[in-house]
Amino acid sequence: MLPMPERKTPREILSADGKLEKDVIAVKVRDKTVDLHTPIDTAGTLRPIRANDPDGLPLSATPPHTSWQTPFSGFSQERRSPSAPP
């Protein structure tokens, strides 16, 4: 049986190489864009994608959404302190 290649997240790899900076939002590996949390084979060469890079602009402009969130949720609501009554 062939040994499985070692898998780490791009965040771990960049951090170990001292290349993880605050504006890095993804990586390019083998012509694929991969987020920082998806484990990948460590054999490939990583190119960090920054928020202001041409490859990073579409990624950083897309807000994260969850099943309970709509694109406009929270914009018209007042912020309340945790101790304030509802």
Image (cartoon, helix red, strand yellow):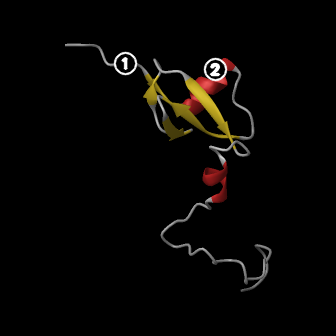
Q: Residues within 10 Å of mark 2 (few under 14, many from 20)?
A: few
Looking at the image, the residue that sits furthest to the bottom is 86
Q: Quadrant of the C terminus?
A: bottom right
Residue 37, position as x, y percentages in the image: 53, 39
Camera-nearest residue between 37 and 31: 31
Q: Secondary structure at mark 1?
A: loop
Judging by the rendered image, the residue that carries numbered circle 2 is 16
Left-right relation of 25 to 41: right
Please tell me which residue is depicted at 51% across the width and 73% down the height of the picture. 68
Residue 15, position as x, y percentages in the image: 65, 25
CA–CA distance between discs 2 and 1?
A: 18 Å
Please tell me whether residue 65 is drawn above or below residue 55 in the rendered image. Answer: below
Looking at the image, the residue that sits furthest to the front is 54
Q: Quadrant of the N terminus?
A: top left
Left-right relation of 80 to 31: right
Q: What amino acid type is highlighted by mark number 1?
A: Pro
Quarter of the image holding residue 65?
bottom right
Q: What amino acid type is highlighted by mark number 2?
A: Ala
Judging by the rendered image, the residue that carries numbered circle 1 is 5
Please tell me whether residue 81 is drawn above or below residue 9 in the rendered image. Answer: below
